[in-house]
Image (cartoon, helix red, strand yellow):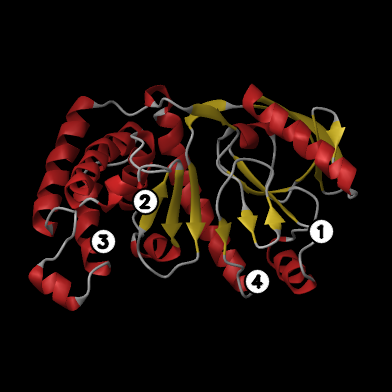
């Protein structure tokens, strides 16, 4: 699956991801939803295309579910209902084009009413039974679901495809950055807005996914990320692999060099830009040239899947 959705009283039905700040208005939610749709579409291409190279994989079903917690306060329930039509019933809020869910006939807004014969219910016991059945079914590679669309219920079967086990989520931050801890990638909303070109955004996603694949961070590895010399090596390794991950997924590797100056400008103040202070990263011009070189190598080495 492409990720579990948690937002201040909302809980999705699948893989763990971080809590997000509660949006203020229905318009905020719809903006977040559009950003998440774009980011997950690009990230999913990378995760599926590179499954054979990842140590940890899981079935991907190509959709993101969410539901409202019964404990959520009334104002929060109302704004999510207004924005996406969300209530306590599990609902597909994103369905990726040409993924297993899309091919099986699941559509955004469809409610998931049963999994493997276990029906969802509004009482606590039935909700828990449904969640347990879903957790059991997910790793199997096959989801037998009963879905409700337009008042009609029908059965569908989703056949999962292998994908790297990395969660990707958009967070409501204005900064143009992304970060990885363990197998969780957080993409700031400001970054999604900065990089309007999909290939350029795919480079950043590839770089962050590379951190996860290479196990650069996570519990017990905090010292590595704080050590300047080790961090410089880590970032270079993520650039090298990240360019190849995006290339294997069919993105243009030359976009990595195009994206870097934009990222450097957005994430440094005037003095840092003037003095070219760059922390553990290479200097802007040096990194851009390095990424251009690695992009050319990747294009020569790799046939997109």
Question: Any mark on residue 26, and which?
Answer: 4
Residue for point 9% across, 70% down: 275
Question: Looking at the image, is mark 4 or mark 3 nearer the viewer?
Answer: 3
Q: CA distance from mark 4 to mark 3?
A: 29 Å
Instruction: Determine which residue is flagged by label 2.
Output: 198
Kind of element beneath mark 2: helix
Whichever of callouts 2 and 4 sits on the residue coming sooner in the sequence is 4
Dot 4, crowdedness within 10 Å: few (<14), some or many (≥20)? some
Residue for point 18% across, 48% down: 232
Residue nearer the viewer, 208 or 103? 208
Residue for point 61% across, 68% down: 22
Q: Quarter of the image containing the N terminus?
A: top right
Residue nearer the viewer, 160 or 278? 278
Question: Looking at the image, is mark 2 or mark 3 nearer the viewer?
Answer: 3
Whether the residues at callouts 2 and 3 have beta carbons within 8 Å, the answer is no
Residue nearer the viewer, 72 or 176? 72
């Amino acid at each position: 699956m492409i990720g579990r959705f948690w937002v201040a009283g909302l809980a999705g039905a699948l893989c763990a991801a971080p809590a997000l700040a509660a949006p203020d208005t229905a318009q905020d939610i719809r903006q977040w939803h559009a950003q998440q749709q774009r980011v997950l579409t690009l990230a999913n291409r990378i995760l599926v295309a590179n499954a054979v190279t990842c140590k940890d994989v899981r079935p991907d079903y190509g959709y993101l579910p969410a539901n409202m917690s019964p404990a959520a306060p009334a104002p929060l329930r109302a704004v999510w209902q207004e924005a996406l039509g969300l209530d306590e019933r599990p609902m597909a809020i994103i369905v990726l084009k040409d993924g297993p869910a899309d091919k099986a006939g699941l559509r955004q807004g469809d409610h998931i009413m049963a999994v493997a014969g276990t029906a969802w219910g509004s009482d606590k016991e039935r909700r828990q039974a449904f969640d347990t059945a879903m957790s059991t079914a997910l790793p199997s590679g096959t989801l037998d679901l009963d879905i409700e669309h337009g008042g009609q219920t029908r059965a569908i079967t989703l056949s999962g495809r292998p994908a790297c086990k990395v969660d990707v989520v958009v967070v409501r931050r204005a900064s143009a950055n992304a970060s990885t801890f363990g197998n969780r990638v957080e993409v700031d909303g400001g970054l999604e807005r900065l990089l309007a070109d999909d290939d350029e955004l795919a480079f950043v996603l590839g770089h962050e996914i590379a951190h996860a694949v290479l196990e650069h961070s996570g519990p017990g590895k905090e010292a590595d990320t704080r050590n300047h010399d080790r961090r410089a090596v880590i970032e270079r390794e993520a650039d090298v692999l990240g360019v190849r991950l995006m290339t294997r997924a069919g993105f243009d590797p030359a976009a990595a060099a195009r994206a870097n100056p934009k990222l450097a400008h957005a994430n440094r103040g005037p003095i840092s830009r003037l003095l070219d202070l760059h922390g553990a990263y290479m200097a802007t011009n040096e990194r851009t040239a390095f990424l251009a070189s690695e992009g050319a190598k990747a294009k020569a080495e790799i046939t997109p899947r």
